[in-house]
Image: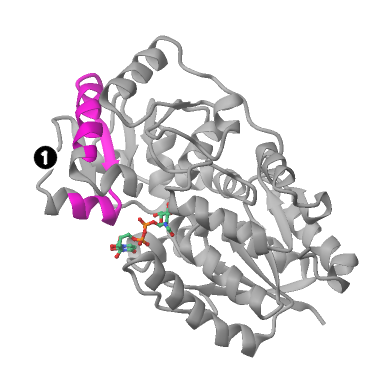
Amino acid sequence: MPEKLICVAGARPNFMKIAPLVRALRADGRFVPVVVHTGQHYDDAMSGQFFRDLEIPEPDYSLRAESGSHARQTADILRSIEPILLDEAPAGVIVVGDVNSTVACALAAAKLQIRVTHVEAGLRSFDRRMPEEINRLATDAIADLLLVTEESGRRNLLAEGVPEQRMRVVGNLMIDTLRHNLARSAQSDVRERVGATGPYGVVTLHRPSNVDGPEQLREILAALGEVAREMPLYFPAHPRTRGVLRNAGVELPAGIHLLEPLGYLDFLRLMSGSAIVLTDSGGIQEETTALGIPCLTLRENTERPVTIELGTNTLAGARRDSILRAWAETKANPKKGRIPPLWDGQAALRSVEALREYYDGAGAQTPARA
Ligand code: UD1
């Protein structure tokens, strides 16, 4: 009798990681994936469109997590997932990434002694001002099986005292999704719709530290305005960012074209034709490395160092001068980069193997939480 694994998806960057995993679990048959959408992201453009683009089955459960403060959102997800865990009595819960849904569902499951698998474990920015860093630390501390995307994740976990047998380096599920969809994305007409013909850049911004204060947002936009004198920039804006732009009356410099949030296939099409990407996203640092497109990360740190060491990513900081310096360097000497190990489109298969090994082996008998 196949055992149930609850797969949690809550916010936009989760959907690309859940999609290949659910597909691989179904194909394998050893487990039955039960998809729970926490509703952390709820707009069609941030959620429903991704389910359609990525052909993720309709969630078995759709919760309606509150927006609002971190405490309210996390508490609301904790409360609403618990009865589902009790009803379904799954063999395990799989959480992905570092959003509030990740930590909330991991915590609810661990307290019920349901085994937790964390996909994308071990990434660390070493910046505890980032809410995601707290989510990563807390989730990894209580997860039983840690599936790791890059070598730095394994090193960080070992340095935190996590025993080697709790982790597996499986590669990057998000890159499985990218490889699976690259050809399909060519059918998107987004470039024609927005008028992106000659060389252009793509911008995304949504980190609270970059967008919640209008002054900081203006500082970044001043740099982007300089870049936009040389090539148009297309900027699909996250609802958080759009709210600040609107409420604080922040003007966009000429040459920056504000767009609605794009679905997965449209965004991949826009990004894959761009000359440069300027972003504060985590996942886009990885996707640009996989595509070989130079990426300027508008942050002081990254939890994904392999994108800098091997890939096309450069940390540009979030000040006007540092961004412009990085832009000048990139123009003079664009990073070519190479694909990090195990970013080969097979991470979901390795994840299912790791789950099988864990559940069929010693892990099933002894709680791994040391
Ligand atoms: C969340 C994640 C972040 C991730 C990002 C990707 C946490 C702590 N943060 O941040 O790690 O990089 O998702 O997008 O979990 N909103 C809408 N429609 C939506 C979703 C959100 O209007 O579909 C609004 C919310 O009401 C809120 C704001 O956008 O006012 C921020 O949403 P929230 O989920 O709190 O955090 P994100 O900034 O999206």
Q: Counting other residues with Cα less than 10 Å from the Cα at mark 1, is it few (<14), some (14-19), or many (20 or more)?
A: few
Image position, residue 110 (x, y; %): 66, 73
Q: Which residue is drawn at 80% across and 65% down?
A: 368
Residue 212 showing in the rendered view? yes
Taking depth in this image into account, of 6 and 72 the one nearest to the observer is: 72
Residue 108 figure quarter: bottom right
Examine the rendered structure and indicate whether residue 27 appears above or below residue 269. Answer: below
Image position, residue 209 (x, y; %): 33, 45
Which quadrant of the rendered structure holds the C terminus? bottom right
Q: Is residue 234 magenta?
A: yes
Examine the rendered structure and indicate whether residue 257 appears above or below residue 295. Answer: below
Q: Which residue is drawn at 85% across and 61% down?
A: 357
Q: What stretch is highlighted in magenta?
A: 216-244
Q: Which residue is drawn at 13% across and 43% down?
A: 250
Give SS at disc 1.
loop
Residue bearing mark 1:
251
Residue 361 showing in the rendered view? no
Q: Which residue lies furthest to the top in this view?
A: 332
Ligand 1 neighbours mark 1 (CB distance < 8 Å): no
Which quadrant of the rendered structure holds the N terminus? bottom right
The answer to whether 243 appears left or right of 91 in the picture is left
